[in-house]
Image (cartoon, rainbow, N blue to C red):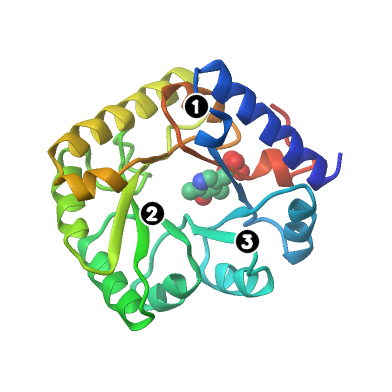
Amino acid sequence: MSIAERYQRVAAEVAEAAMAAGRAPEDVLLVAVSKTVGPEGVAEAIKGGARDFGENRPDQIVLKSAAFPEARWHFIGNIQSRRIPEIVASATLIHSLYQRRHAEKIDRAAAELSKVQDVLIEVNVSGEASKSGVAPAEAAELVRAVAALPHVSVRGLMTMAPAGDAQAAREAFAGLAELAAQIRSQLPADDAAVFTELSMGMSDDWREAVPLGATIVRVGRAIFSESYQE
Ligand SMILES: *Cc1c(COP(=O)(O)O)cnc(C)c1O
């Protein structure tokens, strides 16, 4: 199967899973995580209908967003302070914000570009030491602080589940959904109105995430890797 065909298959499966969960297919956005391929891989996926791509390295999001300005580019990687201006110049949505000092720097970079930067707050729901993200108990305070910045809009939460354990993944996703609902109920109405996204689920666990409320799934290997097996 080509990348275009694999993209189409995953997109059809995500749409089916959304409907099976009683949701509209367009309520779950498939982000094609293109971090392992070059521009030719992105071009292939675009042929298959992909419009949203995820990258975890600033140099790659800069390069690929310039090559494919018709697509939307999602930054899903570790944020380094000095790369924030480039990330803000390229990213439609930053999924991986969890430090207040980075939020303040994003606000300044966005102001310079006369842009309001959409972000998600990454939460370490499972508490694994290897995972980044704010602790669930500190998420509400961070959301409120970031939402108060004039050039940043907090659109929701993101998490990564423990690998290789479907039950642990379900617990992490359910935990994120519950936390988001709690936070949303305490936000001012205008902030709550845009705090609607749950970015959760990757190649191995998006099937767990969609029934639990994912609005964005980030899928890499199932689209771009020839050797990927479910
Ligand atoms: C690489 C990556 C993905 C995609 O993972 P796959 O297992 O290849 O689908 C999703 N989210 C983040 C944050 C990633 O770094």
Extreme residue in the right direction: 1
Mark 2 is on which residue type? Ser
State which mark lies toward you, 3 or 1: 3
Residue 147 place in picture, x, y as percent: 21, 57
Q: Earlier in the sequence, mark 3 or mark 2?
A: 3
Q: Are marks 3 and 2 in contact (CB under 8 Å)?
A: no
Mark 1 is on which residue type? Val
* Vertical placement of residue 24 versus 104, above or below: above
Q: Which mark is residue 210?
A: 1
Residue 4 place in picture, x, y as percent: 80, 46
Q: Which mark is residue 20?
A: none
Q: Is residue 170 left or right of residue 102?
A: right
* Vertical placement of residue 58 versus 10, above or below: below
Q: Secondary structure at mark 3?
A: loop
Instruction: Identify the residue shown where x is 15% and y is 57%.
Output: 145
Q: How much space separates mark 2 and mark 1, taking CA atoms? A: 20 Å
Q: How much space separates mark 3 and mark 2, taking CA atoms? A: 20 Å
Q: Earlier in the sequence, mark 2 or mark 1?
A: 2
Q: Earlier in the sequence, mark 3 or mark 1?
A: 3
Is the CB–ligand 1 distance for label 2 below 8 Å? Answer: yes
Q: Quadrant of residue 15?
A: top right
Q: Are marks 2 and 1 in contact (CB under 8 Å)?
A: no
Q: Is residue 77 left or right of residue 202?
A: left
Q: Which mark is residue 71?
A: 3
Mark 3 is on which residue type? Ala
Instruction: Identify the residue shown where x is 29% and y is 64%.
Output: 152
